[in-house]
Image (cartoon, helix red, strand yellow):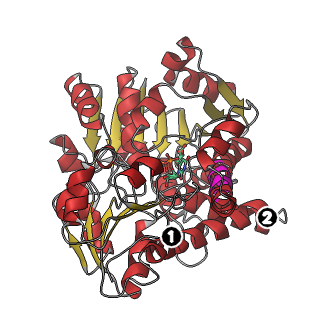
Amino acid sequence: MRIAMIGTGYVGLVSGACFSEFGVDVTCVDKDEAKIAGLRQNRMPIFEPGLEALVADNVKAGRLSFTTDLTAAVAQADAVFIAVGTPSRRGDGYADLSYVYEAAQEIARALDGYTVVVTKSTVPVGTGREVSRIIRETCPDAAFDVVSNPEFLREGSAINDFMRPDRVVIGAETEAARAIMKQLYRVLFLIETPIVFTSLETSELIKYAANTFLATKITFINEIADLCEAVGADVHDVARGIGLDGRIGKKFLHPGPGYGGSCFPKDTLALVRTARDKGAPLKIVETVVAINDERKRRMAEKVITACHGSVRGKTIAVLGLTFKPNTDDMRDSPSLEIIPALQSAGAIIRAYDPEGMEEARHLLPDVVFCGNAYETLVGADAMALLTEWNEFRALDLVRVKSLLKAPVIVDLRNVYNPEEMALKGFFYSSIGRPSLPGSQSGNCSP
Ligand code: UDX
């Protein structure tokens, strides 16, 4: 089997590398010459654990290659995957499909013999049909089928998610297309991964329904966390207490500063728009979007409250900038709302992130970027933990206390234990946990 993967962004590169690991011959195509040149020298454009080694191994084995020549790659392929970006269209929240449709036209011109054209990018319901129409219009004689095969990869664990998925969803409407898709996922068939075959539209909607459901689950536990703070309950016990109910499930019940990343914010918004257009509004998801947006802003107030109601002229040490650990992705990260809000309130920001600082420098002006966690804390009036990187989970708290001007910690990921922090003499504020005497509203130096 031979495939072409159009787009070497997150989805395309991980999927391409993983398919080659399954034994498929993969050519990854991108217009960006510098990116392709880098990949040929095994320079990854993104940070994803395990990706560099996986790419190197498969390039060496001759199963994975990189090119800017779409025509040659498509002509030789049994299946062509469209894995280009579908960013939120500026201003209106609709997914911008111009890259997908452009790719469809180019693919159409290059098709040679029966080929399956697969949409891997997250695309709104109806896009697969439109891709099919574009290909037919561009090249009326082409022999092809369009298939929807959404990815469910999480940044930071994308390779494992691809190799051991909970399920694979394939929207394919002909036997020929299903046969090729089965062959591509043969390795997963062998380990009895559930494969859900559906129509094009159903498959496209499954992807959005999954992401919006997870975003809703996170938002639900975030609101329950706020209620826990109001009534003196512990959100982690609530999450465990409800999560052990098999109908609810334990995952995605960790409270935090609001979901971010390249998918949830964009996909929730796009589904809201589609649903309104189709006259079937998703009021729950609309509310989730609004709550999550507001939550990110409210997190700055939590820091301000911990600093006795004002951060004017005070220095806040921010640990973690990416939307979650094990990625360098800053897209829709809560830090992009929280830091500017603190700056508007007069705070001076020192910050550190293990992988996200290169990107953050372009997005967050007037921040003092530091070389490591401890350097960030020097002379700060409070520490705010925004992303739960492992290296922030086990900080030397004696050292932390000695470096901070005031022993105030605002932990928006609940990494530390409130009792332990109180014992160590910190004014510690976290999310959805009962306040301990003296530890809720902190004591930023005046
Ligand atoms: C998500 C989906 O999980 C994945 O299936 C899809 O393909 C792409 O979108 P990703 O964006 O990489 O993956 O990250 P994920 O681990 O799902 O986290 C998304 C956001 O939710 C992060 O901001 C994270 O901090 C937050 N989150 C997640 C919580 O606040 N609490 C949780 O319990 C889980």
Q: Is residue 175 above or below residue 109?
A: above
**Camera-nearest residue between 26 and 286:** 286
Quarter placement of the C terminus: bottom left
* Residue type at numbered disc 1: Met
Q: Is residue 255 above or below residue 272?
A: above
| Residue 170 point in image, percent of width and height | 63, 33
Residue 283 is tagged as 2
- Of circles 1 and 2, the one toward us is 1
- Disc 2 secondary structure class: helix
Which residue is rendered at x = 67% and y = 34% of the image?
172
Q: Residue at label 1?
A: 299
The answer to whether residue 54 is left or right of residue 203 is left
The answer to whether residue 90 is left or right of residue 33 is right
Q: Where does the magenta region start and end?
A: 214-222
Q: Is residue 345 above or below residue 173?
A: below
**Camera-nearest residue between 388 and 41:** 388
Q: Residues within 10 Å of mark 1 (few under 14, many from 20)?
A: many
